[in-house]
Image: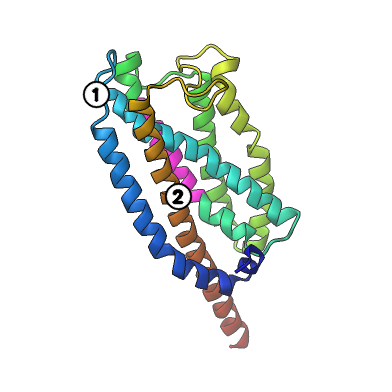
Amino acid sequence: MALIDLANPTRFLRFTERVLPWLIAATAIVLATGLYLAWNAPDDYQQGATVKIMFIHVPSAWLAMGIWAVMSLSALGTLVWRHPLADVAARAAMPIGAAFTLICLVTGALWGRPTWGTYWVWDARLTSVLVLFLMYLGLLALWSAVDEPSRAGRLAAILTLVGAVNLPIIKFSVDWWNTLHQPASVVRLGGAAIHPTILTPLLTMAAAFFLLFVTLHLAAMRNEILRRRVRTMRLRQASAA
């Protein structure tokens, strides 16, 4: 099946029905492997066992930004290419992105207390991630406030593209401003600066989180398509009555 065929909602539902069981199994296997590696990873010589919060915090932070990037591509699909499933993909990704951003903020605060001596400071990285979380909530509120899905999709697409400006601010905030956060140590020029005993479980957990997102996203897209079909049927019944 070509990817263009998935633009048809019915074909997309059939495709996800076949793929989702495999994705769930793969997510469970990789997540179990990642948790095992993370549990057996060595403690940091300064932070002790608290460094293992990183195995949840960092993948959540990556997904928080990555999901907004996916939504930005979906926004282009809605506004430029008029793809029939673009706004469905964006709507399905919003609550998942908000959840991972909240996990990032909470685990960051729990990690910051023993490391920095405080749960929160208004530095550039923390503030820009908080702004990202508020933008997710704003988009969800917008979708709830507009009854017509296609109109809500267009408005949300515009706001999503505007909000994408925040992504490079989050990424490079540790380089542009003085901050409590250390500079990038995984995704950077010159390769990762983390020892393999830490890097391997971190990348495994990142792969598990990515698979978890894909699984949740496809399932949420199925629900959104079915929800819209039910809404259309009810409107037809109401107009015929």
Query: Which residue is the site of mark 1?
Result: 49
Please tell me which of labels 2 and 1 falls first in the chain: 1
Q: Position of residue 27 (x, y in %)?
A: 37, 52
Q: Position of residue 200 (x, y in %)?
A: 37, 32
Amino acid beneath label 2: Phe
Residue found at x 53% / y 44%? 67
* Residue 4 occupies quadrant: bottom right
**Residue 124 sits above or below residue 99 on the image:** above
Q: Looking at the picture, tell me which residue is in the foreground, 172 or 205.
A: 205
Q: In which quadrant will I find the N terminus?
A: bottom right
Residue 186 in sight from this viewpoint: yes
Please provide the residue range marked out in magenta.
Answer: 94-109
* Residue 240 occupies quadrant: bottom right
Amino acid beneath label 1: Ala
Q: Secondary structure at mark 2?
A: helix
Q: Is residue 95 magenta?
A: yes
Secondary structure mainly formed by the magenta segment: helix
Query: Which residue is the site of mark 2?
Result: 213
**Residue 37 sits above or below residue 19 on the image:** above
